[in-house]
Image (cartoon, rainbow, N blue to C red):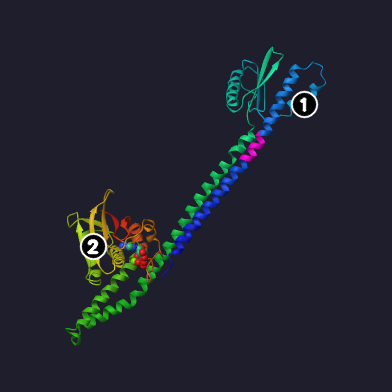
């Protein structure tokens, strides 16, 4: 038995990784927001000083000694915060640190500045510089480019990281699937190959015994023949898994009936099998018989295991919601599968049985989805009442 805990461990690990990623993302955003707040405060101080400087210059005596100092150390020192100085009617007097090309028409420049003023207004209230109650200037300003970039930086970074993670995840799971495929196919081919040699010699022995007068009317020979035939079917299954299987239009009802024939004779007579169909008996679907029989056997065997020796299994051909498809519902009266496990049961290695390998449903899903381009899932299940598996095939 392979412990089922590998899957709960794996999903806990997944949760842990997602948790750590979220924590790192949140920390980045919080830290950058802190930096943004600090830088923003500093820019605010710079611009307040700028306003004070301008106010001083406008109101100062022409020959004041401080003018040069203020011009150089305060007004010119602002090399990052974009500012526009206007009169009361918002006619531009001067501007600084804006990306406005030199060689454009006055009209275009005016339009650009107007747009900038609108943007600045949206961000901050302008600073008012009054000249002795006679006239006023406005200083419009907005965040520096650095501050703006810093504001968006964590989101850009996190988006890039998220995209990379998604790509890495898909690349990884693709290569893992490809590897799994090679294992399934390789093992199946090898098994079919190894069974082939003794099987052909067994067949020859069986033919010999059948025609030998010494064993005439011996029931043992017939039994031997049945077992040889069974071995042949098993070999055929493995050889079909190991190659690209041929799908043919087959009368589905008859295929289903044949498939359960083998099990029917081997399980307790208290397990009742029933086959029903909403379609005329000759309705076909595209299947590979050895593989499809394997699927039905696996699902029905599980159904038998799920009932303690007594109950019923109903196989019903029904209409599928998918166009051009036909569905087979396999319903049992077993112990049911809890909602949280209804996908997990298809994972290789998932089993709740002492002597289970947990490969039956994984194999069945592979056969239906990869080899028949169909679907296999738990249609409904109730603990204590029973389960219905649905196989969807193409017509
Ligand atoms: N019809 C069913 N009713 C209840 N449980 C089921 C049924 N079919 C499958 N299961 C559950 O799914 C598990 C996996 O099934 P499977 O892949 O066939 O492996 P195994 O039969 O070796 O355990 C089973 O161990 C069982 O717990
Ligand atoms: Mg099984």
- Tell me what residue is drawn at x 21 percent, y 60 percent: 253
- Residue situated furthest front in the rendering: 384
Is 158 placed left or right of 315 in the picture? Answer: right
For residue 198, say whether it is visible: yes
The part of the image, by quadrant, that contains residue 64 is top right
How far from the left and from the top, in percent, is residue 66?
A: 81, 22
Residue 305 sits above or below residue 205 on the image: above
- Residue situated furthest bottom in the rendering: 214
Overall secondary structure of the magenta section = helix
Mark 2 — residue? 256
How far from the left and from the top, in percent, is residue 260?
A: 24, 66
- Tell me what residue is drawn at x 26 percent, y 57 percent: 329
For residue 250, say whether it is visible: no
Is 87 placed left or right of 230 in the picture? Answer: right
- Tell me what residue is drawn at x 53 percent, y 54 percent: 17
Mark 1 — residue? 72
- Tell me what residue is drawn at x 24 percent, y 71 percent: 268
Q: Nearer the viewer, residue 64 or 286?
A: 64
Mark 1 / mark 2, whichever is N-terminal: 1
Residue 316 sits above or below residue 29 on the image: below
Task: State which region is magenta.
Answer: 33-40
Mark carried by residue 328: none
Residue 34 lies within the magenta run: yes
Position of the N terminus, as image quadrant, is bottom left
- Element class at badge 2: helix
Which quadrant of the picture is home to ligand 1? Answer: bottom left
Marks 1 & 2, CB-CB < 8 Å contact: no
Q: CA distance from mark 1 to mark 2?
A: 93 Å
The part of the image, by quadrant, that contains residue 297 is bottom left
- Callout 2: few (<14), some (14-19), or many (20+) C-alpha neighbours within 10 Å? many
């Amino acid at each position: 038995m392979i412990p089922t805990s590998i899957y709960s461990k794996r999903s806990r690990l997944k949760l842990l990784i997602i948790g750590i990623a979220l924590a790192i993302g949140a920390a980045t955003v919080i830290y950058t927001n802190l930096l943004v707040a600090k830088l923003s405060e500093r820019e605010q101080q710079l611009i307040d000083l700028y306003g004070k400087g301008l106010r001083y210059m406008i109101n100062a005596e022409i020959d004041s000694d401080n003018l040069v100092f203020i011009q150089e150390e305060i007004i010119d020192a602002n090399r990052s915060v974009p500012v526009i100085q206007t009169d009361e009617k918002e006619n531009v007097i001067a501007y600084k640190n804006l990306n406005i090309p030199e060689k454009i028409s006055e009209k275009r420049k005016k339009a650009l500045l107007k747009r900038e003023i609108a943007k600045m207004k949206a961000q901050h209230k302008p600073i008012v510089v009054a000249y002795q109650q006679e006239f006023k200037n406005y200083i419009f300003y907005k965040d520096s480019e650095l501050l703006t970039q810093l504001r968006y930086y964590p989101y850009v970074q996190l988006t890039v990281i998220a995209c990379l993670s998604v790509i890495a995840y898909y690349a990884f799971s693709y290569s893992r699937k490809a590897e799994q495929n090679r294992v399934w196919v390789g093992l199946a081919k090898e098994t079919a190959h190894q069974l082939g040699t003794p099987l052909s010699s067994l067949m020859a022995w069986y033919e010999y015994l059948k025609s030998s007068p010494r064993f005439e009317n011996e029931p043992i020979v017939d039994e031997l023949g049945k077992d040889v035939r069974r071995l042949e079917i098993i070999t055929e299954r493995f050889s079909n898994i190991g190659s690209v299987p041929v799908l043919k239009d087959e009368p589905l009802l008859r295929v289903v009936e044949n498939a359960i024939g083998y099990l029917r004779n081997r399980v307790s007579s208290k397990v009742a099998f029933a086959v029903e169909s909403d379609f005329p008996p000759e309705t076909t679907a595209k299947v590979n018989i050895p593989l499809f029989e394997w699927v039905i056997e696996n699902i029905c065997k599980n159904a038998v295991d799920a009932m303690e020796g007594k109950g019923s299994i109903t196989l019903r051909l029904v209409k599928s919601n998918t166009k051009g498809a036909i569905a087979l519902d396999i319903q049992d009266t077993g112990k049911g599968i809890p909602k949280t496990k209804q996908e997990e049961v298809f994972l290789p290695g998932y089993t709740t049985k002492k002597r289970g390998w947990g490969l039956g449903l994984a194999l069945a899903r592979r056969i239906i989805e990869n080899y028949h381009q169909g679907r296999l899932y738990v249609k409904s299940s109730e603990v204590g009442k029973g389960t219905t598996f649905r196989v969807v095939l193409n017509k």
